[in-house]
Amino acid sequence: MTPTMKMYGKHRFPGKLFIVEGIDGSGKSTQIALLQKWLESEGYVTFFSEWNSSPLVREVTRRGKKKQMLTPMTFSLIHATDFADRTERHIIPPLKSGALVLADRYIYTAFARDVARGVDRNWVRGMYQFAVKPTLGFYFRISLDEAMKRILGGRDAIKFYEAGMDLKLSDDLEESFRIFQSRIIEEYEKMVNEYGLVVIDASLSIEEQQAQMRQIVLGALAGTKKTRIRKWVDLSTMVKKGSQA
Amino acid sequence: MGRFEYYGEKGFPGVDLSELKGKLIVIEGTDGVGRSTHTGLLKQWLENNGHAVLDTGMTRSALAGEGLKAAKTGHTLGGVTMTLFYATDFADRLENEMIPALRAGFIVLTDRYIYSLMARALVRGADPEWVRQVHDFALKPDIIVYLRVHIDELITRVVQGDGFNYWESGMDLHLGEDLYDSFVEYQKRLLREFENMAAQYNFQVIETSPNIEEVFEQIKDRLTPLLRTPR
């Protein structure tokens, strides 16, 4: 028989789920990468999951974005589909095995973006009821000005949907981005209490933020097994043993 | 008849429901019950009577249609993912095909609607409240014609038609030893879900029979009052 669907907050797994949220330029990806390095060096098994990573749905999403076919509703639904595939394939199995799952962006990204696009707040929350509730959710708080400085300073140009250009807020990409992202910040701020997100001041130095994160994560690790196989050590031992025999 | 409504509180941002002038007719029923035959006949009949008709069906959206086909070939979708993928496809067709046609005053004739999607999700163990809520952005149709069939009759039709296929047999659910056993069990469960929905969503139930003309006459009878009433 098909197992009945488990809803948010009702999953029970031996593993732990840590997620980071925040607008582009908040530095959350850097922080979760550093957290993973540390956890692995401590001997934990970690598994990293990114937003928009399901191979199955990626092609549809990519095409929809490229051809600008997505409306607020289909944008919302296709991302939920992607997230469902990620959950069923990449989040639940490692959690069942007792691993630490790290996610760069989670359902709160969808709640912020979709509501900023005018999709009904309760409807989006209802749709994501299948999601596993994170052990800890970090929100990297940063001012829009600071985030814009970081983004415009480097890497790729602002993308169409990231700037909310589909909403026709402004013909100017940068201006549209500013309006749209400030709506997203507003939504994130509301979620801090709603979902008990841990706020990290993203204007602090990278080292200070990471130290705070590690301390908080450490408190949530009680009872987690350290079962990581140190491959290079094992292999070298095997080679030595082999040559002696 | 008044203006269109959504099942839920809110639906598509930016769509003004008071602008929708056409009518929305849904033909529902399980696989192999003759939905596409009757949809085709209805289209001709409606056009002969001077109505502009848009006919549409499942998994054909510009956005997700191809992706769904690919996903089904690989049989790799999980239950929740599959439900949401179909919902995405449906939303794309509703917003980008059906709603514009309704705005232009067309009769939109759709072969399947959210009820098939919900039935499929429910037999795969999805939470009923979640399933209802995910699909509540759908417009309430003007009429839902449900073609009811008994499982024995359905088996006869399928054997004489295209035979049993993987998805129509719910093979992903591992309900039986082979396609036949699985088909029977899967379709029984789907039929049960449709029956549960019939009262709640006010289905116009029509008993199907091998006599296509007779069934078609009944469908026309149910539609006639609707066609006379202005929106």
Image: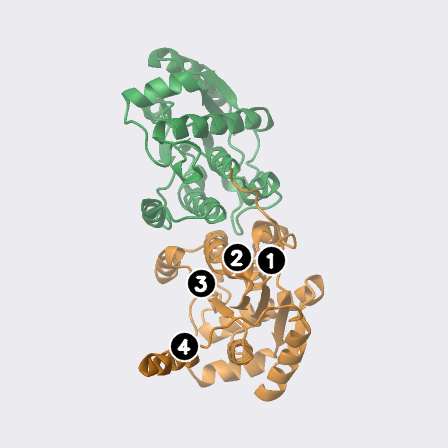
Q: What residue type is labelled 3?
A: Asn
Which numbered disc covers residue A92?
Answer: 2
Mark before the other along the chain sequence, 4 or 1: 1
Tell me which amino acid carries mark 1: Phe
Mark 3 and mark 4: Cα distance apart in space:
19 Å
Of the two numbered discs 4 and 2 in the rendering, the one whose residue sits closer to the viewer = 2
Which one of the lettered chains is coloured green?
A: B
**Left or right of residue B91, residue A216 in this image:** right
Marked residue nearer the N-terminal end (4 or 2): 2
Q: Are marks 4 and 1 on the same chain?
A: yes
The residue at the point 39 percent across, 42 percent down is B97
Residue B185 coordinates in the image, percent (x, y): 45, 27
Which of these two is toward me, A22 or A214? A214
For residue A195, which quarter of the picture?
A: bottom right
Label 3, residues with CA under 10 Å away: few <14, some 14-19, many ≥20: some
Label 4, label 1: how far apart the Cα atoms are: 40 Å
Q: Which residue is drawn at 56% across and 63% down?
A: A98
Give the numbered dot on residue A157. Answer: 4
Task: Tell us which disc is closer to us: 3 or 2.
Answer: 2
Q: Residue A13 carries which label?
A: 1
Q: Quick one: which chain is orange? A: A
Same subunit, tags 4 and 2? yes
Q: Which of the two discs, 4 and 1, sits closer to the camera?
A: 1
